[in-house]
Image: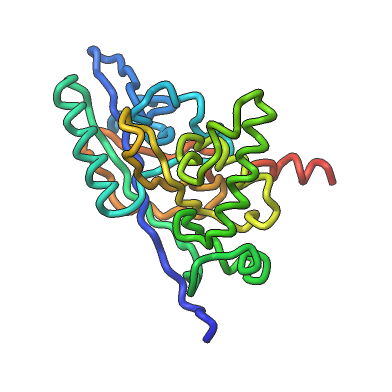
Amino acid sequence: MTQSASSRVQLTLLSLIRMHGQNVQPLVGVHSVCQREQGVELIAASIPFHDRAMDARAPQPGKGLLALFGIRDALDELQHWRGVARTSQAGFAYLHLQVDVGAPAAAAVTRQMLRSQGAQLRFLNVRRSAAELQKEMLACFAQWVTAEGGNAARDMAHVRQMALRPDLFERLLYEDEDLRHIDVLVLPLADWPDPGRMRQVAYIRAGTPLHALVQGSDQMQVSLPAWMSRRHGAAEACNAG
């Protein structure tokens, strides 16, 4: 039976700032700050990594954002960063979003399903995809690591090692033609000092329709960057004729 019902997933962005009189210092999860008559507006960035050495592997502005995903992981992260805010005397805010991801897949997603369902399939959870598809992703990662001058046999020999390279998931999303319809990619992330600790986060492609649900502060407003409303490369494609 063909599934036609559409479903939504909830995603969360969070921001920390420190106030110095009238000056606002962004800490994490903030791209920029705007002072409005009604209060402080925070233009969101991707959620922070626990290992700040991974900051260079964050999504590129204009392409997408990383957000919290999953009830347990999201609650754990919100609790952690609330604690960081308390101990550092920082302001804490979050934004819950809902995303319409179309009809859910009836089984573990394969490459053939990506091709046959096309735009009907806009959500992909890497860890719940077919093993063969994950192996194909790993092969791409290994190729890119080798091209960087890295040791793929050591650093990209197992599927679980992909969790160390969120930047390559972004590259995959934009370079794999079969993923062109995926708006939300749930990916594994290993950004804690403990290499065995892993969580899931969601990559939201720019241009994905988002519905604001809850602002998590009455003193600050978290807003999306303007470029999140349009597909990356859309203007260039139009100009190219």
In this view of the protein, can residue 36 be seen by the observer? no
In this view of the protein, can residue 109 be seen by the observer? yes
Judged left or right of residue 155, residue 30 is left
Going by the picture, which residue comes out furthest to the front?
Answer: 153
Residue 27 lies in quadrant: top left
240 over 112 or under it: above or below: above
Residue 24, position in %: x, y?
31, 18
In the foreground, 90 or 58? 58
Residue 122 lies in quadrant: bottom right
Figure disc tally = 0
169 over 84 or under it: above or below: below
Q: Residue at x 32, y 28 (%)?
A: 193
Going by the picture, which residue comes out furthest to the bottom?
Answer: 1
Residue 32, position in %: x, y?
42, 25
Q: Residue at x 15, y 26 (%)?
A: 86
Residue 14, position in %: x, y?
32, 37
The colour scheme used here is: rainbow
Going by the picture, which residue comes out furthest to the right?
Answer: 241
Judged left or right of residue 204, residue 76 is left
In the foreground, 116 or 156? 156
Judged left or right of residue 87, residue 209 is right
Q: Residue at x 34, y 21 (%)?
A: 26
Residue 61, position in %: x, y?
55, 32
22 over 97 or under it: above or below: above
Residue 16 lies in quadrant: top left
